[in-house]
Amino acid sequence: MASFQLLWLIPLIGLVGSSVVYCVIAMIAAADYRRSGCSRMREFPAVSVLRPMAGDQDNTEAGLRSVFEQDYPDFEVIMGAASSDDAAVGIARRLMAEYPNRPSRLIFTGQSPHPNRKVWQLRAMWEEARHETIVMADSDIAWTADCLKTVVSELAPEGVGLVTCPYRAVAGPSIWSRLEALGLNVDFISGMLTARLLIGMDYAIGCTIATRRSDIDAIGGLRAVQQYLSEDFVIGNRMHGIGRKVILSRSVIEHYIGNDSMRGNWRHRLRWARGSRRSRPLGYLGEIFTRPTVPAIALWMLAPDWRMLAALALLMRLAVAWTAAVQVLGDSGMNKRWWMLPLEDVSSFATWVLGFFGNTLTWRGHRLIIGRDGTVQ
């Protein structure tokens, strides 16, 4: 019986102990990021901002307005929609009329023949862009007024090929949206900062990416990432692969995650998990150490002699959550939602486990199959 107990107790103790070590590293990584900075340029190059659009359900007007209102001397806004029937088109036209002195264009890209419709729209807008420096932004984000100045300044140093922005998830009113936002504002940014500290940035996240036309051409252009589910990850990874630096920006943007029902939220989470597993298999496996709550509770219940270690892991989890969400991302909602963290931890742990199984996902109403290399069909 004793030997049988050791078969599960030793690995569980090791897992919880390793999670404590991860929490310490994550907080060091957050402190390192907060100390980082970049000199602001005096003269800024002209910039083309590419903004795909798909509907008006994710605070589209507020987000698009934040682009038009950038405190930047010379930039154009290019917006792309599949057709004139898209609900976001009216918003785009209204803002174009409201800001007549801002160079802006609205183009219709047609329906994408590929599952990744965002890249299809970006490719069409790319051809319309007039400038070498290009910033691509998702339809569900909002910028601070100095975002463009920050990311373009960070792109300027020699050797930098891409700047990618962290984001603060903004939830809808449903409990499922609030849970997901809590998890994103704690776990996603913590994992990213830890990777940045230990190995440097070798991937990008697509909410906002600043780069140059020549650097994207050097990795095969946008056409080369058309078939991938996580095209942002691939762009950053290939940029890193050709020796160009990927920088995590100091500009934190807002990402509206919608207000899905429980079913829609789980589909979204599962799509994210299965996509992450194929984009970075070893990193996905290592996420077990970033999720201490469930193993710590199991250790507390099954091995009373190790409750101090379990309690330490839970306290460190709270410390990481506070550091990431409040100190790094400025998420004031953490003060109200911290008590939901255990429920989110159980949900995210279950999703992580399910992410190891299956190769189908639902994306914007389409059922897709994801391959081992991260491509979808």
Image (cartoon, grey):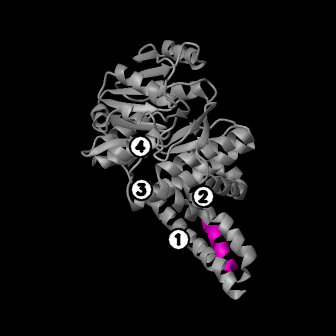
Q: Are marks 4 and 2 in contact (CB under 8 Å)?
A: no
Element under label 2? helix
What residue did someone put label 4 on? Answer: 234
| Alpha carbons under labels 1 and 3: distance apart | 17 Å
List x then y, in percent, for residue 45: 29, 30
List x then y, in percent, for residue 322: 60, 58
Element under label 1? helix
In the image, residue 58 above or below residue 204: above
What residue did someone put label 2 on? Answer: 321
Foreground disc of the pair 3, 4: 4
Q: Is residue 179 visible?
A: yes
Foreground disc of the pair 4, 2: 4
In the image, residue 129 above or below residue 164: above
Which one is earlier in the sequence, the residue at label 1 or at label 3?
A: 1
| Alpha carbons under labels 3 and 2: distance apart | 18 Å
Other residues around mark 2 within 10 Å, as few (<14) / some (14–19) / many (≥20): many
Q: Locate residue 293: give its quadrant.
A: bottom right
In the image, residue 160 above or below residue 81: below
What residue did someone put label 3 on? Answer: 196
| Dominant secondary structure of the residues highlighted in magenta in the image | helix
316 or 177: nearer the eye?
A: 177
What residue did someone put label 1 on? Answer: 21
The stretch of residues the image draws in magenta is: 306-316
